[in-house]
């Protein structure tokens, strides 16, 4: 199933080129506040799935082109980002298997929205494409064997980082600025996506492919990332974990860019970039 | 006013006489059933709720605070921001650039709860006693002069920190986001009762022995500057929480079986237990190892 949020954050599902309003099939979840719907749906999906599928098969949809898609999970309770996890592995004596940082839930925007390069003294706004995992059950201390069974679904994310803020050894706080976390276009449920370790991911800026990689290249696979994350903290339904991106090349965004993240089996997330100050950045990386 | 959550996360007012009055009859209209969302909802609607809270507090005796189970007063802030550094500890010129990081908003625990040390190979687990700011309204791009009205209140917070878990070249701060690494309590004191948040004494004890004892006057960036900086980078929401950093003088290990207690004047005192299933041990007292930031930067550990 391919789940979306649209209009006033109505929960829907895609059926071909149509979107079907799932509100009548999800009971009280549809009445929760806009940010609580997807986490509640994810947590209760196993029990409500049959009713949702029945509704989906018997209800007329609206043309997808007639609605405004939102981020399918417009405010995850926690948004945890794996750093790197492609390219060179960490040294064997590293104290963590993979490094993480948080992004602010307020950084999330949806398809067609703008990434706003705000007036902060950044050295550049770096963009990377990543697979994002949406959690379906309370998860703590997962093992490799069962970790994927805690996944509700997958979506695409453009992870933008305002580099160079704060102290010289920065804290990644620049990943948490408003609008620097576009997510979408839909959440594909785990059963429908299948194996998350063979997905081609592309980052396309103004029609030019800037990143082109495959989740086969991940150092720790999705299950390992979830094991490492839940060794630190409990994850809850609706929490999102992004699983990393190749460190090179650095892709810098500027005003007017049209950016897409495309992932096999999920689709394409399109956003535009706005810099009210119209700054220009060095063409090469920092 | 001092606000608490107690027993089954019901809202209360902590009176000056040490009694807690249940105000859930006044918050029922909010329709919040998720305890994690209750305090942010109270904060967002506080101007409307306050008269009813005052009436209940004046007319009811309540229960002695010793007879209730206090909970963290804001157990799941929408966002939990933490200042990076932010105290002038050793003589130096100028101020370091302002910086923050996000800490897990799920790791908060309350009075009497237990911090369980994870099996990860940390060099030490430190207590960082900090003043916590609770945001009162949606806020973006505030100047320091505009920050005060956005502050709802203050609480005590311990930024429990596993040292030595950083990846080389990274300052991601994951060693601060283990479950339970955010003891908070005992109450939120509303901002009207704390006219000068940069004139508060902060104290932290381990097993009754004083470790940290400093004034919030020593912040490099004051409370209004902290709120302003955060709001210039991201949108703050009612219930968001910013801890102001600690004065690293006096830091020491937290370990198996210990009791940590923290107090800030005008807010109050609370405590938490420490357990370590791995049964590691460190020298008890103020930490003199290079993993203590104050030692690393050339200052002297504090001996009260």
Image: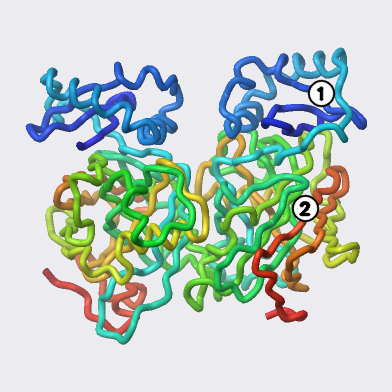
Q: Position of residue B252 (x, y in %)?
A: 26, 65
Residue at image position (29%, 59%) is B127
Q: Residue furthest left?
A: B17
Identify the image quadrant of residue B300: bottom left
From the viewer's perspective, is the residue at label 2 or at label 1 nearer? 2
Q: Position of residue B287 (x, y in %)?
A: 26, 70
Q: Is residue B282 visible?
A: no
Q: Nearer the viewer, residue A23 or B63?
A: A23
Q: Chain of mark 2?
A: A
Q: Mark 1: give few (<14), some (14-19) or many (20+) Cα within 10 Å.
A: many
Q: Position of residue A195 (x, y in %)?
A: 82, 44
Q: Chain of mark 1?
A: A
**Residue A17 higher or lower than B269, as above or below:** above
Residue at image position (78%, 63%) is A256
Residue annotated with mark 1: A20
**Residue B60 higher or lower than B262, as above or below:** above
């Amino acid at each position: 199933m391919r789940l979306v949020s649209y209009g006033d954050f109505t929960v829907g599902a895609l059926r071909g080129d149509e979107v079907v309003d799932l509100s009548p099939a999800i009971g009280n979840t549809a009445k929760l506040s806009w940010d609580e719907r997807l986490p509640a749906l994810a947590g209760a999906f196993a029990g409500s799935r049959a009713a949702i599928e029945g509704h989906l098969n018997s209800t007329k949809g609206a043309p997808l082109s007639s609605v405004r898609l939102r981020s399918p999970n417009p405010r995850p309770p926690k948004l945890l980002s794996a750093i790197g996890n492609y390219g060179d592995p960490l040294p064997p004596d590293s104290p963590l298997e993979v490094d993480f940082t948080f992004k602010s839930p307020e950084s999330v925007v949806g398809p067609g929205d703008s990434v706003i390069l705000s007036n902060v003294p950044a050295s550049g706004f770096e963009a990377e494409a990543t697979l994002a995992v949406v959690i379906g059950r309370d998860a703590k201390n997962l093992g490799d064997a069962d970790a994927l069974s805690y996944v509700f679904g997958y979506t695409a994310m453009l992870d933008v980082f305002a580099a160079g803020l704060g102290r010289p050894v920065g804290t990644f706080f620049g990943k948490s600025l408003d609008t620097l976390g576009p997510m979408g276009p839909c959440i594909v449920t785990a059963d429908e996506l299948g194996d998350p370790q063979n997905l081609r991911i592309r980052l396309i800026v103004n029609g030019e492919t800037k990143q082109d990689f495959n989740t086969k290249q991940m150092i720790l696979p999705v299950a390992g990332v979830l094991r490492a994350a839940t060794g630190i903290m409990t994850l809850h339904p609706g929490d999102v974990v992004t699983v990393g991106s190749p460190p090179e090349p650095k892709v810098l965004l500027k005003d007017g860019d049209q950016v897409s993240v495309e992932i096999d089996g999920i689709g394409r997330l399109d956003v535009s970039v706005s810099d009210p100050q119209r700054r220009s950045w060095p063409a090469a990386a920092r | 006013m001092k606000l608490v959550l107690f027993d089954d996360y019901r809202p209360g007012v902590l009176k000056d006489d040490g009694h807690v009055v249940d105000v859930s009859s006044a918050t029922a209209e909010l329709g919040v059933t998720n305890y994690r969302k209750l305090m942010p909802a109270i904060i967002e609607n506080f101007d409307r709720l306050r008269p009813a809270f005052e009436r209940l507090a004046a007319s009811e005796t309540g229960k002695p605070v010793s007879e209730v189970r206090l909970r963290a007063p804001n157990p799941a802030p929408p966002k939990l921001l933490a200042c990076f550094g932010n105290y002038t500890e050793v003589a130096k010129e100028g101020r370091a650039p302002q910086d923050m990081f996000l800490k897990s908003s799920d790791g908060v625990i309350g009075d009497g709860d237990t911090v369980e040390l994870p099996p990860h190979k940390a060099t030490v687990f430190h207590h960082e006693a900090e003043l916590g700011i609770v945001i009162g309204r949606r806020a973006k791009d505030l100047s320091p002069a505009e920050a005060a009205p956005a502050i709802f209140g203050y609480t005590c917070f311990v930024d429990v920190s596993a040292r030595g878990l950083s990846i080389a070249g990274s300052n991601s701060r994951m060693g601060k986001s283990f479950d339970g690494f955010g003891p908070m309590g005992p109450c939120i004191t509303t901002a009207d009762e704390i006219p000068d948040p940069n004139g508060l004494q902060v104290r932290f004890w381990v097993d009754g022995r004083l470790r940290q004892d400093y004034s919030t006057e020593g912040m490099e960036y004051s409370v209004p500057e902290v709120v302003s900086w955060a709001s210039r980078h991201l949108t703050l929401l009612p219930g968001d929480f910013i801890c102001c950093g600690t004065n690293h003088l006096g830091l020491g290990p937290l370990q198996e079986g210990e009791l940590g207690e923290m107090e800030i004047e005008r807010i109050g005192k609370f405590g938490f237990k420490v357990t370590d299933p791995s049964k590691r041990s460190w020298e008890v007292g103020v930490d003199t190892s290079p993993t203590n930031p104050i030692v690393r930067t050339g200052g002297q550990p504090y001996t009260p």
